[in-house]
Image (tube, rainbow, N blue to C red):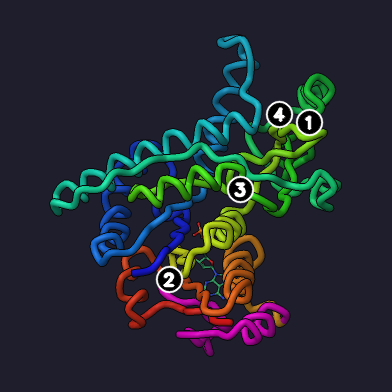
Amino acid sequence: MAKIVIALGGNALGNTPYEQLELVRETAKPIVDLIEQGNEVVIAHGNGPQVGMINLGMATAAEAKAIKSDMPFPECGAMSQGYIGYHLQNAIGNELAQRGIKKEIATVVTQVLVDENDPAFTHPTKPVGAFYDKETAERIAKEKGYTMVEDAGRGYRQVVPSPKPIDVIEKGAVEALIKDGYIVVTVGGGGIPVVRRDGLLYGTPAVIDKDFASEKLAELIDADLLIILTAVEKVAINYNKPDVKWLSEMTVEDALKYASEGQFAPGSMLPKVQACVQFAKSKSGRKALITSLDKALQALNGQTGTVVTG
Ligand code: ADP
Ligand code: MG
């Protein structure tokens, strides 16, 4: 029996709420396989399309004066954690019931601490939400203090920084729930980014990479294993090239060498490998695994996936 943090990628949730409700039924199966084997499971997930949809919808409605206000980015993140959590609670709960396993699932709306002095804040990189013409973008930037940039000829958009996670504010609640036997959904979308000023926490418009937030959580709750579930069964070197080589394992040293050679795409595989490296070297005996959703159980049993060891 192990304490496992599972990070779900975009392919586990899909792009619309309808697609998501369908997909999570499949997502629930490998997760419940791990639970059925007696593991303590904590689930983290991405929220790119979901938070984008909420932000864009609210901003568009507010510009059209259909509603009184747009929805600030941290609140959009909280909303996405809520409905994704509901879908996971529903699907995993139904799967558990069908297998006769008596366990409950709880979603924790989670804040993740970032540092205001993180260099990411001086150069925001993640475009979010609606496209505007120059004039509207300038007005909104002035009104709300947003950073707006021109995005690939399609118009102007808000950009937010992607700082590194430092702490998970609700980690105590997560641990208490695990101790009481609950399956926990937490740090959704990398968590709601908060900064600390004079001892108080304030939500800030930013996007924390869900792979890094999952890793931080895994360290904080002293997990044995971090499993990053994504669209590929294994990590490759020479990916998309004729001499592609799929890896069953990587030491931290191998991973760093491959990363420095540019083997992992920034924004997709690179943060996953970096998160695995960080976890594997954080304490002796900790390992991390990257595989696809449908292969989770086989990978846990050492039959597939890419394992990263210290
Ligand atoms: P997620 O939503 O799970 O975070 P991403 O699309 O961000 O998924 O990242 C996973 C993708 O990374 C894979 O589907 C694959 O296309 C891509 N990728 C980039 N480099 C590699 C590599 N070296 N080995 C395997 N996959 C890679
Ligand atoms: Mg990703």
Res. 146 mark = 1
Circles 3, 1 touching at the beta carbon (< 8 Å): no
Marks 4 and 1, the one that precedes in the sequence: 4
Marks 3 and 1, the one that precedes in the sequence: 1
In what quadrant of the picture does the C terminus appear?
bottom right
Crowding at mark 2 (Cα within 10 Å: few <14, some 14-19, many 20+): many
Identity, as a three-letter code, of the amino acid under mark 2: Thr
- As displayed, is residue 69 above or below residue 249? above
Quarter of the figure with residue 84: top left
**In terms of depth relative to the viewer, which is nearer, 101 or 227?**
101
Marks 2 and 1, the one that precedes in the sequence: 1
Kindly report which numbered mark, 4 or 3, lies closer to the viewer in this rendering. 3
Q: Residue 258: within the magenta?
A: yes
Q: Which residue is mark 4?
A: 132
Q: Which residues are magenta?
A: 233-260
Q: Residue 274: within the magenta?
A: no
Kindly report which numbered mark, 4 or 1, lies closer to the viewer in this rendering. 1
Q: Which residue is mark 2?
A: 291
**In terms of depth relative to the viewer, which is nearer, 126 or 138?**
126
Marks 4 and 3, the one that precedes in the sequence: 4
Identity, as a three-letter code, of the amino acid under mark 3: Val
From the top left corner, tell me how far across and down residue 163 is, in percent: 73, 50
From the top left corner, tell me how far across and down residue 74 is, in percent: 63, 33
